[in-house]
Amino acid sequence: MHTGEVQQFASAPQAVGARKKYRDPNDIPGANNIMHDRRVVRGNTYASMVQPQPDMADVQKQREAQRRRLMRANKTTKRAGTPDPVPGRKHMDIQTDSYLEELTERTVEFEAETQTDFLLDRPPSPLFMPAKIGCDVETQIEDGELFDFDMECEPVLEVLVGKTLEQGMMEVLEEEELESLRRHQEDFEKRRNAELLEVQRMEAAEKRRQEEMQRRLQQQASQREQDLSIMRKVVSRSIAAAHLSSLKDRALAHLLDAGIFADAVQLAVDNHFMPQLLQLVTEQMDQSRADRQIFGGVIQSTAQQRLEKQERVLEVERRRIAAIDDAERQARIEIAAQRARREKEAQRVLEEQAGLVEWEEKEPPAPEEQPEFQVVEVKDEDGTTQAVFADGSAVPVPPEKLEELKQALESLTDGQTVMAKVASVPAEGDDGVASSVLESFRVATPEESAPADGAADPEAA
């Protein structure tokens, strides 16, 4: 606050009055009809409940009513609780029941066990009522014996004084805030007035500039009109001077053309020379016209001959093109016939293939695959190269497969083996004996190297 200003209160101090209770304790609530209660569901209890679409107006009304209820609940004054104890004392809990219970430092504990069937209904446990112990003692307290006016009024006075001081401080702060707002308003008015003056000055300057620009434009327009007027006068004077300077010569020339000044030479030319010249020119033009007609007839006859020759050539070309078209038409007919023959041939091939497949299905199953034997080494015996199998038997190796078999044995890695098939060779002559020879071989992995019949004899195969 400023020095010299008097403190002003917004309202006079007054005591706090009693407020109305939230509910009247003597009010007896009336009975409600559950048929009109929204929380009660009517109809089938196991069918899905169809929720109607809520009306926005009803929803808005419900929200507004709920907001009013919350505002009334916030405004409701709750019952004052027990005030804090005065300095030097403290609140203690006392027993006001009709019986006394002995309080011990250690709670009495004991253990008990029982066994019941969990499926049976258990009766409700009775309320625990501790037995009375000790002796009842009573005393008489008269009205006013426990009431100390000074002690009881001190909290109330503290509340009143504190509330009064708080109200006074709030009013002082409010006056300070109003004074600050007034100063802020004055500063704002000053700044606004200064800005208005600056705006008016800028508007006046802009107005002067616009007026000066309009005045300069008017001066420029008047100067342009004056320059155009002067230029028209100068041009008019120059045209008049040029016209008057050649007026005499043109007048004499006009009189001369009109025949005012007669000339003997000119008369001779006009009366004798020009008519003869015109007659000669006319005769020459007639001769030229006759020559052109003759030349046109010659050209027309030549062009007619060439046109007839061209027509004959075109007729020959038309016949040639017609012959080509006939040949192409015949070729297309032959191609269509060939296509039909090819389709018939393809249909026949398909039928033969179907018959061949049907015949192959009736054929007996193919013979079983020949067994394979593991090749261990290649050796020469009596001039014959033989492949030794794992069971100790040996068969001859054809010369064309010898090098390939040796390379396969040399390039084996861990776990790889060479598996071979044996073919039977018929005997020569009637008394000969059939023999076996190495037919083919391959490099196999450990899973594939197990022979179908390890003990089979390749000679028997």
Image (cartoon, rainbow, N blue to C red):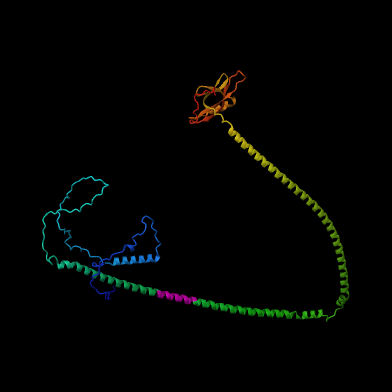
Q: What residue is drawn where x is 36% and y is 67%?
A: 61
Magenta range is 192-206
Marks counted in the figure total 0
The N terminus, quarter of image:
bottom left
Q: What residue is drawn where x is 30% and y is 67%?
A: 72
Placement of 265 over or under 376, stated as above or below: below
Q: Position of residue 48 (x, y in %)?
A: 39, 56
In the image: residue 118, left or right of residue 260: left
Q: Position of residue 349 (x, y in %)?
A: 65, 38
Q: Position of residue 322 (x, y in %)?
A: 77, 50
In the image: residue 307, left or right of residue 359: right
In the image: residue 366, left or right of residue 446: right
Q: Position of residue 139 (x, y in %)?
A: 10, 61
The C terminus, quarter of image:
top right
Placement of 141 over or under 418, stated as above or below: below
Q: For residue 162, which quarter of the picture? A: bottom left
Residue 212 or residue 165, whichever sits in front: 165
Residue 3 or residue 349, whichever sits in front: 349
Residue 180 or residue 165, whichever sits in front: 165
Q: For residue 347, which quarter of the picture? A: top right
